[in-house]
Every structure is written in structure tokens, then in C-alpha cells.
Amino acid sequence: MSSEAIDRLNLVAMAIGHELRNDMLSISMHAHLLAGRLPDDPSAAALVRSAERARATVEDLVALARETKAFEAVRISSVISSARLELNAIWIDHLVDDPSVRAHGSLLARAIATLYRNAIAMSQGRPTITTRVSTRANRVVIEIEDDGPGVATSVMTTLFEPLVSARPGGTGIGLAMCKWIVALHEGEVALVQGQPHAVFRVDLPLLH
Ligand SMILES: Nc1ncnc2c1ncn2[C@@H]1O[C@H](COP(=O)(O)OP(=O)(O)OP(=O)(O)O)[C@@H](O)[C@H]1O
Ligand SMILES: [Mg+2]
């Protein structure tokens, strides 16, 4: 993909954030007012949750477009649990300890969530997803392994490029966004194993 095309995509992302921002704030505020008036109505509560999530998405994308460095110390366990909100899988965890990184917590959680979402999208049934966290030479290493069909050879070397997808209904944005967010945190994301199951690795500077 040419750099002009990537610039255009970035501008579209920023324009979406810019144009939706005020409406999302208003939707969120009115959803809260409605839920206040209808405290026992599950639809009103669901509306508040959806409005909050959509508002947070717009705020995060604007932060990403600005390449914000408004980072704070964040525990990896909290990033991982935010990444899993709303996702359904069997989770197996091997966390040697719970290291901290300097991060925009919700953006970093979105980057990890793209890896979890792909694992779930590629699986035939309810996936089992194994997450390993360790520290190596001042880096925090997060490995995510699924039990799906593995990565198609047609996308094995290009899957972090924008608009590369080998999944029906996929847009090919997830991993490109993941790479961008991880790079913003001075980290790297890579596919370390494509077959028989996919294993992705994210490594980030360890915060002492
Ligand atoms: N865990 C995985 N197992 C197998 N293939 C994967 C996995 N993760 C990614 N891929 C492959 O990499 C491609 C690119 O992934 P990416 O997340 O960028 O886009 P997508 O999932 O197709 O669409 P979306 O933009 O909606 O996320 C996928 O279409 C899929 O072929
Ligand atoms: Mg995806």
C-alpha cells in the first residue's frame, strides 16, 4: 500500500473521530439521563453501556491519531482483563508475575483485543486462548496462542499491512491497528508461529 493511501486512511480515521465525537458525547449523556429516569429498564442500561463503549472508541481513536504519549504505569493483568471485556473464550493464563508498562491503558488493551478477536473469529467453536506473560531483558513479553486453523499461507508475510485479510467479512484493519498501537508504546508485535495454530507475540519495554 502506498504512503499516500496510508495518509488518506489516517485522515479518514481522524475525520471519523472528529465528526462523531460531539454526537457520541450527546448520545452518552442522554442515555445516562434516560437510565436515571428508567432505573429498572434493562434496555436503558444496555444503551448506556453501548454509548459508553462507542464514546470510548472514538476517544481512543482520536488519541491514536494524535499519537498521544499521555501514558501512565499500567499492570499487564489489567490490560489483559480490559482486552477481554465482552469477549467469550476459554482463557488459559500463564503469568509468571504481573509486570508494569508505560501505556495508554485502553489503547493498549485494544491492541491485545485485536489478537483475541482474531483468534475468536478464526475458531470453529468456542476457542481456547492461551496467554503467556514473562519478562526478558527489560522487556515484557506477551504470547497469545489459539487453537484455530492457523494462518493462511497467502497472508503469512503481509498480515500486519492495512487491508490484508483472508477471512470472510474481515476488513484487514485489526492487525495494522494493533501494530500501530504497539509501536506507539515502543513495542513490537509479530507472528511467531503460523501453523498448526497461530501464536502472536507482543513485547514492550518493562517499567521498573
Ligand atoms: N489468530 C489467527 N489465526 C489465523 N489467522 C489469523 C489470525 N489472526 C489473523 N489472521 C489472519 O490475518 C488476517 C488479517 O487480520 P486482521 O485482524 O488485520 O484483519 P481481519 O481480521 O481480516 O479483519 P478486521 O479488520 O475486521 O480485524 C486475517 O484475515 C486472517 O486471515
Ligand atoms: Mg481482525
Image: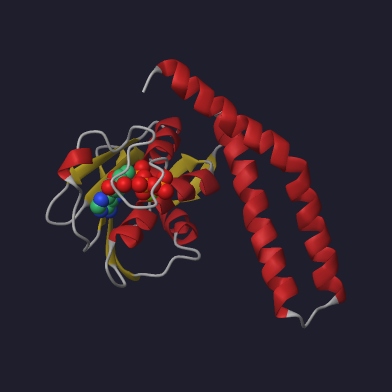
Q: Residue at x 84, y 72 (%)?
A: 36
The way the protein has been coloured in the rendering is secondary structure
Quarter containing the N terminus: top left
Number of marks in the rendered image: 0
Which percent across, then down, holds residue 164?
Answer: 33, 37
Horizontally, is 55 left or right of 162 in the view? Answer: right
Q: Can you see residue 190? A: yes
- Tell me if residue 106 comes above or below residue 67 in the rendering: below
Taking depth in this image into account, of 113 and 78 the one nearest to the observer is: 113
Which percent across, then down, holds residue 57?
Answer: 60, 48
Taking depth in this image into account, of 24 and 163 the one nearest to the observer is: 163
- Tell me if residue 161 comes above or below residue 192 in the rendering: above
Which percent across, then down, holds residue 25?
Answer: 77, 49
Q: Can you see residue 140? A: no
Horizontally, is 157 left or right of 23 in the view? Answer: left
Q: Which quadrant would residue 31 be assigned to in this image? A: bottom right
Quarter containing the C terminus: top left
Q: Residue at x 38, y 33 (%)?
A: 162
- Tell me if residue 45 comes above or below residue 82 in the rendering: below
Which percent across, then down, holds residue 90?
Answer: 32, 72
Check the image and name the residue furthest to the front: 168
Check the image and name the residue furthest to the left: 196
Q: Which quadrant would residue 20 be assigned to in this image? A: top right
Q: Residue at x 38, y 48 (%)?
A: 170
Taking depth in this image into account, of 64 and 173 the one nearest to the observer is: 173
